[in-house]
Image (cartoon, helix red, strand yellow):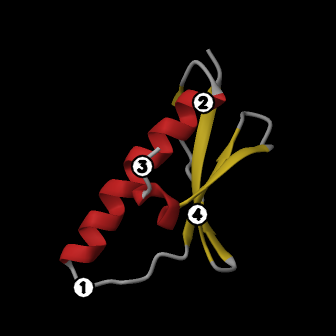
Amino acid sequence: MPKYFFHVRRGSSVELDEYGVDLLSVEEARSQALLAAREILVDKAINGDASDDEVFEITNEDGRIVSAVPFRSSGKAG
């Protein structure tokens, strides 16, 4: 099963996911990122943090970015 890493980009800085998650597909990884981004945005709203410029950069085991999920897009129905 492939492993995907969910790095968080904030402007020019990146918080690396050192562990990753075993998932069946890029689509499943993207769905997981959307759910996590929604939870993070809710926590930020509760704490009064209005910034939404973060992006999950999903990479495969080779380090190649296979998808990007902007946090601000996580609130859209889809």
Residue position for label 1 = 48
Q: Is 57 located above or below residue 66 in the figure?
A: below
Amino acid marked by disc 4: Val
Q: How far apart are marks 3 and 2 (CA)?
A: 16 Å
Amino acid marked by disc 2: Glu
Badge 4 crowding class, 10 Å Cα cut-off, few under 14, some 14 to 19, many 20 or more, is many
Badge 1 crowding class, 10 Å Cα cut-off, few under 14, some 14 to 19, many 20 or more, is few
Q: Earlier in the sequence, mark 3 or mark 2?
A: 2
Q: How many labels does the image show?
A: 4
Q: How far apart are marks 4 and 2 (CA)?
A: 16 Å
3 vs 1, front mark? 3
Q: Which of marks 1 and 4 is nearer the N terminus?
A: 1
Q: Which of marks 3 and 4 is nearer the N terminus?
A: 4
Depth check, front residue: 15 or 35: 35
Q: How far apart are marks 1 and 4 (CA)?
A: 19 Å
Is residue 35 visible to us here?
yes
The part of the image, by quadrant, that contains residue 38 is bottom left
Q: Residue at x 80, y 36 (%)?
A: 62
Q: Which mark is residue 77?
A: 3
Residue 43 in percent (x, y) is at 25, 67
Q: Which mark is residue 27?
A: 2
Q: How far apart are marks 3 and 1 (CA)?
A: 23 Å
